[in-house]
Image (cartoon, rainbow, N blue to C red):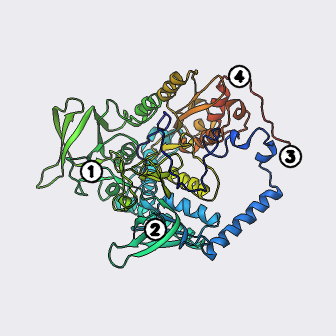
Amino acid sequence: MHSAISLSLSSPSPIARSSAVNDTCPSPPRSLRFCGLRREAFGAGASSAATSLRLTSSDSRSQHSNLNGVFAALKGSSSGFDYDLVIIGAGVGGHGAALHAVEKGLKTAIIEGDVVGGTCVNRGCVPSKALLAVSGRMRELQNEQHMKSFGLQVAAAGYDRQKVADHANNLASKIRGNLTNSMKALGVDILTGFGTILGPQKLKFGKGDSGDKIITAKDIIVATGSVPLVPKGIEVDGKTVITSDHALKLEFVPQWIAIVGSGYIGLEFSDVYTALGSEVTFVEALDQIMPGFDPEIGKLAQRVLVNPRKIDSYTGVFASKITPAKDGKPVQIELIDAKTKEPKETLEVDAALIATGRAPFTKGLGLENINVQTQRGFVPVDERMRVIDANGKFVPHLYCIGDANGKMMLAHAASAQGISVVEQVTGNAHVLNHLSIPAACFTHPEISMVGLTEPQAREKAEKEGFEVSIVKTSFKANTKALAENEGEGMAKLIYRPDNGEILGVHIFGLHAADLIHEASNAIAMGTLIQDIKFAVHAHPTLSEVLDELFKSAKVKLTAPKTVAQAVPV
């Protein structure tokens, strides 16, 4: 499950640098703006052979070095601390950092006070995808016209609520076990308890009593994640007024459910509930539903995902008070105008799902012991995830990744940030390009995106003085989509015609969540349109939607092409 994405387009405000900053993380050259794969990082003399995908002797040496790193981590820390790296929080972000740390030869421990996997595996991305897999199949079986177009006749589709819920729970358990086993197999110490920072490079873990154990670490990563955000005035009873944590258990399917918030979380649950027979009412504070998406994609998605289904909406209103069902009375939702705060009306529904986003879980971390003040609960960090104290200085050897820092509240963003931090503490200057991180909404059809929306791109262009161009392609022109009778969809490319830079890509259609990665990787690696349009895509595949998209773009500047060296086969 996804939460709100916040990306700042402006330059970060200047921060007073501490003289005690980790000396393994020198400031990168000005040209190294993002990840180490950008062209500027290699310098003008970089050989094209350095990026060849062929297996060479250097690749073999690299693999041997990685194995040495694993064995070194198993031997113990050589830094004079109990551990080279301790991670507080064993969610997807902490897990990604731990595995990369072991690969780099660091003695690593991870502290978890709940269960391995964090929000994503146990109460978010993973179980929600299990429910969405069910809703997708239900929709297909319920669409008589769609099935007849294939020459198929299907009897009335039904479902077993408990078995659907078991599918989600079993998937979460399986993935949780996989994560745990992968860390144990590589020698990561899994420490049970709540982690608290006592001071620089010092922390404790346990139940918060006299039995807590104190350990030291050369570097510490905070990866404590987030919890559902419940606004004031809303009473959650876990039965009729619920958060996504409760909804994923699917303890009952209400006849009529109000979903407060129409972002990723709300939209995905509307897909599940309507497929299982519920009527849905969105309550959205902004003037339109699906506010976080590119406006053009949002309009198309609303026409397909909302209008034909049993969904209505109230926009421009707050749910000022929600009372759970009791004494034979339904759930009551008091609505007020979002701008004037004047009362509007009261809704009576069978259940209400609070999908207003997520809040960082940072209380009790001991941040006061290192003079760190949270901002709306988020731990302040710079572009390298280094924690900033109340005086604007870096806290030595302390980093924060994932939902707890609020940069981009996505599980894979947390993992990428964790890997970036490990690169830094092992001596490699690395800055993650958050504009290259994709996001997806797993509705039917799916929505995916990377980079800037069209309004964001035009705002940036106006400030920096460049032109923006847009090209679009339709799934109705794609052979594979038509073979699946899934021609409803569109891909949109936002780019600079003067130099071929990809600013953003947005997709709505069949398997959009899988298709977006070609674009996100292109942005991460600094690949320009005039280069990527020569990439070859298998036919017939959905990937040709992006192939046509890139080929449709017109770049004014004829930039020199880097031609890969021919490989004899």
Residue drawn 59% across and 63% down? Answer: 101
527 lies above or below 114: above
Q: Decide: marks 2, 4 in contact (CB < 8 A)? A: no
Q: Calculate the distance from the C-alpha at mark 3 to the C-alpha at mark 1.
A: 60 Å
Nearest the viewer among 491 and 308 is: 491
Of badges 1 and 2, nearer the viewer stands: 2
Mark 1 lies on residue: 254
| Amino acid at circle 3 | Val
Q: Calculate the distance from the C-alpha at mark 1 to the C-alpha at mark 4.
A: 57 Å
Of badges 2 and 4, nearer the viewer stands: 2
Mark 4 lies on residue: 557
Label 4 sits on a secondary structure element that is loop
Residue drawn 74% across and 27% down? Answer: 559
Q: Decide: marks 3, 2 in contact (CB < 8 A)? A: no
Label 3 neighbourhood size at 10 Å, few (<14), some (14-19), many (20+)? few
User: Residue 502 at what x, y percent from top left?
Assistant: 61, 32
User: Residue 536 at what x, y percent from top left?
Assistant: 73, 38
Give the total of numbered labels.
4
Of the image marks 1 and 4, the number of the one nearer the N terminus: 1
User: Residue 345 at what x, y percent from top left?
Assistant: 16, 35
Of badges 3 and 4, nearer the viewer stands: 4
Label 4 neighbourhood size at 10 Å, few (<14), some (14-19), many (20+)? few
Label 1 sits on a secondary structure element that is loop
Residue drawn 70% across and 35% down? Answer: 532
Nearest the viewer among 276 and 328 is: 328
